[in-house]
Image: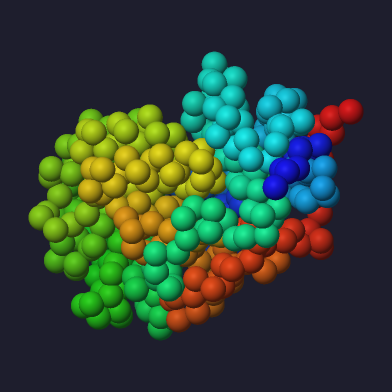
Amino acid sequence: MTMPTITAVRAFTVRGGGADYHDQGKGHWIDDHIGTPMGKYPEYRQSRQSFGINVLGTLVVEIEADDGTVGFAVTTAGEIGAFIVEKHLSRFLIGRKVTEIEKIWDQMYFATQYYGRKGVVLNTISGVDLALWDLLAKVRQEPVHALLGGPVRDELQFYATGARPDLAKEMGFIGGKLPLHHVPAEGEEGLKKNIELLADMRSRCGDDFWLMYDCWMSLDVNYATRLAHKAQEYGLKWIEECLSPDDYWGYAELKKNVPKGMLVTTGEHEATRWGFRMLLEMECCDIIQPDVGWCGGVTELIKISALADAHSKLVVPHGSSVYSYHFVITRQNSPFAEFLMMHPVPDQVVPMFTPLLLDEPVPVNGRMKASALDKPGFGVRLNPEVTLHRPYPVG
Ligand SMILES: C[C@H](O)[C@H](O)CC(=O)C(=O)O
Ligand SMILES: [Mg+2]
């Protein structure tokens, strides 16, 4: 089979939801006094949008081949990402065969290494990489999961992240991950409130439902250790992303400090095999949580996951919708997946990247059949009703 050649690369930005799921309207649970590293400043405590959590917006990358097939993907990188794609990365794509994914990744990473390595540059590389997988799978008329070795189970099982684990339980999820609301700067009163919310959710959800706390990089080792010990009484399953992603030493200490049986998880703001190697070799956590749209895409996640497997660690990707579903279904060391509840309340299931994609599958009763992913590529389409903006058209 002669493989098509890439003829065009286009990068668009989108506002309001989509891959930048923090870019929501007023009153959404995801922006309601959630603990962050900026919480030490009272003026940035109530709203994450107040310090700019949604400044990037969504990046859409489209890659077209000479047979007319178009692959696309979305990530969090907005206008900066569009600049990097059109002005820098497109040179590694135009004229290449759609099968050259590994070589293109290597060239994108090493050509941007002097200003990249992590953060928005890796989000952008991830977006291009995912668009390439979408393109190749569409050319082959297969789902991406088939290119990754095929499903190892018949269905995905999900836990839900959101403000209402009690409602998530009624919707059939296996667990609920709450955002932590109060940071160390809010003192003992804040710590008490953090524990009270967990206790309340435990009483609503019963003993067997998983409850987790997402700390979004907002704590220090001492506070996180105290929180973990107080939370043990309420059966906290894991404590997530307590510290700065750069504080590998702090995570290693925290993992030793938490009560036996409680898991330490992190990694959604980590990137590449080298970043995850630090987390794994320094024994920072029990579960790594790469975001497929931020860690380097599927090409890099394959390597990260193999490394985790060799360390007997689970990989439960952060959010990332279809990009994670197609991966998780193919891996034994990814036994369940995250579903981020993007309904503002959240009392119902809506697609994670709503309103940007059409055909984005959602869990039903906390589960998703592998067959729901049996469409070419990642199986989603751009919603034509969403306005795309192309800030740096080339040529
Ligand atoms: C809810 C968290 O603060 C964040 O918005 C999402 C996240 O970290 C996760 O889903 O994990
Ligand atoms: Mg998290």
Question: Outermost residue toward the front?
Answer: 1
- Please, is residue 126 above or below residue 371 in the view? above
- The image shows residue 370 at horizontal and vertical percentages of 49, 71
Quadrant position of residue 76: top right
- The image shows residue 345 at horizontal and vertical percentages of 53, 71
Question: Outermost residue toward the left?
Answer: 260
Residue shown at 37% from the left, 45% from the top: 305
Judge by depth and name the residue closer to the eye, 35 or 302: 302
Residue shown at 34% from the left, 73% from the top: 174
The answer to whether residue 208 is visible is: yes
Q: Where the C terminus falls, by quadrant?
A: top right
**For this view, does 314 lie left or right of residue 60?**
left
Question: Outermost residue toward the top?
Answer: 114
Q: How many marks?
A: 0
- The image shows residue 269 at horizontal and vertical percentages of 44, 40
Quadrant position of residue 104: top right
**For this view, does 337 lie left or right of residue 128?**
left
Judge by depth and name the residue closer to the eye, 67 or 188: 67
Residue shown at 21% from the left, 38% from the top: 283
**For this view, does 331 lie left or right of residue 73?**
left
The answer to whether residue 268 is visible is: no
Residue shown at 54% from the left, 73% from the top: 371
- The image shows residue 243 at horizontal and vertical percentages of 31, 40
- Please, is residue 325 above or below residue 280 in the view? below
